[in-house]
Image (cartoon, grey):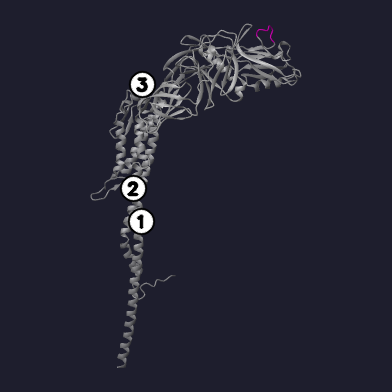
Amino acid sequence: MALSSSGLGSGMDIDSLVSKLMNIETRPLLKLQQKQQLFESKISAVGQVKSGLASFQAALKALQDPAKYQALSSSSSDKDVAEISAGAKAPVGGFNLKVETLAAAQKLSSSLFTNSKSAINGATEETLSFSFGTTSGATFTQLSGSTQKDVKIPANATLEQVRDAVNKANIGVSASIVNDGSGYRLIYSSGKTGTESTLKVTAAGGVSSPLASLTHDPAVVGGTMTERQQAKDAVFYVDGLKITKQSNTVTDAIDGVTLTLKKEQEAGDAALKMNVSRDTAGIKKTMEDFVRSYNEFTKLLKQMTAATPGTAPGEAGSASPLNGVSTIRGIETQIRAAFSGQSNNGGTFQVASQLGISFSKDGTLSLDSSKLSKAIEASPDDVAKFFATGAQVDGKGISYVSSSAKTVAGSYDVSVDGLANGYNLADNTPTLLAVTGVPFEIKIDGMLVSTSIAADSYSASEMAKAIETAINSEPELTAVKGKVSVSVDEDSGKLLITSLKSGIDSKVEVVGGLEFAGFAASTGVAGSASVSGTIGGYAARGDGSKLIGAVGTPVEGLTIELSGGTIGDRGSLTYTQGFSFNLDKKLEGMLSTNGTLDSFNKGLNASLKDLQKQQDAMAKRLEATEARYKAQFNAMDRLLAQLNASSSFLSQQISSMQKSS
């Protein structure tokens, strides 16, 4: 057990005395520590406010997508018969649907083979040729724009090898072998439904070919293959109007609507009720999340700034860490001001209350769903303009991608002087053709292609499709992964051939033979490394197929995507900044580096750092003070010990003298 030597001379408890004195000396340090705890609690509270504000900002950003306000929902009274899905262009309303016939693909069956593994042709490689078209009686007419597909059959091929060769060729025909108990049959199934996708299958050697038993030509009486399933078109009625289509998935009967036919109806069956309506549920959910997020954030602010008075007279109350902080009070004030401010967006709705968003008496935000639904039904575009940030495009081949905080709302003309894809625009509009066949030559990205389109009469769009199919079917071009798009230019009505390769090597050069389509021999317009042009008259930066507004201009950061088309004026774009954009800018200013909260937080941390320095300095002084007290008391103790020793010695001397006398 350790013994303290303090007070041996005086009998005083020096350690206790020093401790009590130091309790008094450390009171200023305790006050600094209490102040430090207060600053730490404020920093923690600011962190909670930032987190809450970031959550509110995320809910706000969900309002900025214009597509949310254009969303449609669709319904079918019997999904087992037909389903419906609606795109952005679908008309809102209902219609009746009656399904008479489902589209079907043609299936052909060979005669019986006793073995699927025995050779059925000789020692020479053979070719089976497949064509798609329409069959009327004994007449087969090849589909306009399609080309014959050849499949190489190896020498001494078995029925299984024929099947595998057809499937591997990937020509739009599937082959299978069926054993019906009496033998093996090869089945051809057209890859597409509809009467325009019937099959004609021929062999290079004709009826004398070893593979003649696997061919099918409607013009040959008593053909070798049997039609097991007839090709049929889909036949249905929309509000009593008869419509015939090649597929059971129909995208072009009603603009923006996709119908999926699944089951044929009997003559006496009732028509289906199909409906397209505004998807207000999704918008309401987004709005409700936004309102709830705001109320949760303001509740957090109240908790962080609250003050509670004492319960008894003279009793001190309590206060939350951020009570009385003007910076924090200003956040709620700025946000509330945004709700009452007017949004100059060019639409019908200018303030949030017009869309059912308003403040209750207790200061919470509320949503009138009925008022919002009516606004969406009346003018979804104007609802989008109020809330969302986006652009309306009045032009062809241009689409809005994004913007920046520095983009200024307004209408801007778009002009293009360079495209990433090379193209060739016809000099004249094409004429209808009724010819035996039209060969032509064209260079795509430097690759010469010699091909032709089938004999037929063509409209402009049919001609575009036929030329595109003919070019893209050429094996030389396919080998280098080249491809073109051929379309009818919306502005001029002329044919437009565009290379799908981008960059300076992208070129379309008409060599000859396309005069019927309006093309003279021409090198066209070569592609560029990136698009180039102007937005609103301001030079823009190209990035692949994107055009981006330059720094320092009103269109800074405005990004648009260009697809197809030609150089020159491409239309205009009207950019709007809705309520959510303007409020988001305020929130960004509060949350960003050197923003409102960051600056306040830096001040708190600086004060906290200064307090720590003061505590460190005071702790050193207290350590010296304690050492000084101990040294002084120990010196006093030693002095008292000496005095006591002297007193004792004198007492002994006096006592001795008294005895002697």
Q: Quadrant of residue 216?
A: top right
Residue 233 in the image: state x and y as whole percent: 56, 12
Magenta stretch: dominant secondary structure:
loop
- Mark before the other along the chain sequence, 3 or 1: 3
Circle 3/circle 1 CB separation < 8 Å? no
Q: Residues under labels 1 and 2: Cα distance?
A: 15 Å
- Is residue 222 within the magenta segment? yes
Q: The residue under label 3 is which amino acid type?
A: Ser
Query: What is the magenta range?
Result: 218-223
Q: Residues under labels 3 and 1: Cα distance?
A: 63 Å
Q: Which mark is residue 613?
A: 1
Residue 576 sits above or below residue 114 on the image: below
What residue appears at the point 76 percent right and 18 percent down from the top-left corner? 122
- Mark before the other along the chain sequence, 2 or 3: 3
Residue 617 sits above or below residue 375 on the image: below
Can you identify the residue that label 2 sits on? 603
